[in-house]
Amino acid sequence: VEDMDTGGNRSLPDCLYQDLTKVLATDKKVFWQGAVQERLGAVATKGKTAAKAAMKKGLKYLKNKSGKDSMDSKVESSAGDDTEEEAIQPNESSKSKSVGKGNYFYEQGFCNEAAEVEARIAFSTFFVSLLGDLRSYLTQNAPGTPPVVDKMKFMKGRAQNGDRPGTAMFLLLGHFMRSKLFDEFVAARLRELQTRQAVAEDAPLFALVTNHHRSKKIAFYLDNVRNSVKELASSLPGRYLISWNESVRSRTSALTSMQAYNGDARKALTQLTADCNETSTILVDTMMVLWTRMQEGKGLQWKKTHLALQIIRDLLLNGPINAIAEAIDGFAS
């Protein structure tokens, strides 16, 4: 829901709520994707088994109909049919209850680089729109004099932009204005203006966006800020890790799947070990997928645990030294 004030401006808390809701939806989609694919694969296998059993049952019926079998063979056939029907209906209690459910606590939040970047964009958009424009809370009383803080001006501006008196955001900002944290924040911004410090490429996203708007003379409207944040976030160092993490996750999931691996499994495992040796981030992502597979590997899903243990063994033998610590922490959990 987008709340609009009389001026047609969206409230920043509502926009942040919408952005974070989308981030959670994206995170949940990635988290459940592997489990859903496994569930579909299990359903397809069950249908194939049922079709084979039905075909055999039909052939036996025709055979009995022709009168070639004795009554004893019919009884045996009927017993065999009952056995096949039991085979078609798997024992529900033996199924893994963890398939398609997952466990966020066990995954320690399920590290998802793509969703983390989107969350960073959402919070940066919120804070830049709120505090990025220095003119919203600084006033120059006379030409040539340094600007001073004008808290009333800031609160009036926020009221005009959707955070009206009586709302939770207005009360929160009132407390924030009276805190030492706000005074230190404003003092840091003033030092930046006076010293004219150049913004480094690896500076926080807040500093990059505010400097971009000031240098390009772009108004700090919400849509403008969101576009700038997305543009600058796409060029931040470490962005390449997103596609790398996603490929490692999908490869690990495929190697520990109930379905046969499509390709050279040994070569894929060697590449996975090499990626884990490259950076600890990839190792953590790999181990998280393996712990999830071991959680799912109950009952008929035992193969997932077996394959996950094989990969852990290979990482302990050929992977980085911190794979030992990851394994110890995981098994202790």
Image (spheres, helix red, strand yellow):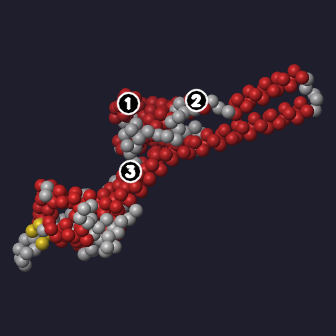
Q: Position of residue 200 (x, y in %)?
A: 22, 61
Left or right of 236: which side holds 305? right
Query: Residue 113 has which mark?
Result: 3
- Furthest-bottom residue in view? 143
The quadrant of the image that shows the N terminus is bottom left
286 versus 310 height, above or below: below
Sort mark 2 into few (<14), some (14-19) or many (20+) by Cα contacts within 10 Å: few
Q: Which element carries disc 3, helix, strand or loop?
A: helix
201 versus 101 height, above or below: below
Query: Residue 333 has which mark?
Result: 1
Sort mark 1 into few (<14), some (14-19) or many (20+) by Cα contacts within 10 Å: few
Q: Are marks 3 and 1 in contact (CB under 8 Å)?
A: no
Q: Position of residue 67 (x, y in %)?
A: 94, 29
> Which residue is labeled 2 in the image?
93
Q: Which residue sits at x=27%, y=74%?
A: 218
Measured Cα–Cα span from mark 2 to mark 1: 25 Å
Query: Between 86 and 329, which is closer to the camera in this rendering?
Result: 86
Q: Amino acid at mark 3?
A: Glu
State how many labels appear: 3
- Furthest-front residue in view? 166
Q: Which residue sits at x=91%, y=23%?
A: 70
Q: Amino acid at mark 2?
A: Ser
Q: Which element carries disc 1, helix, strand or loop?
A: loop
Left or right of 44: which side holds 140? left
Residue 184 is drawn in which quadrant? bottom left
Which is more N-terminal, label 2 or label 3? 2
Q: Which residue sits at x=22%, y=59%?
A: 171
Q: Which element carries disc 2, helix, strand or loop?
A: helix
Q: Position of residue 94 (x, y in %)?
A: 58, 29
Q: Amino acid at mark 1?
A: Ser
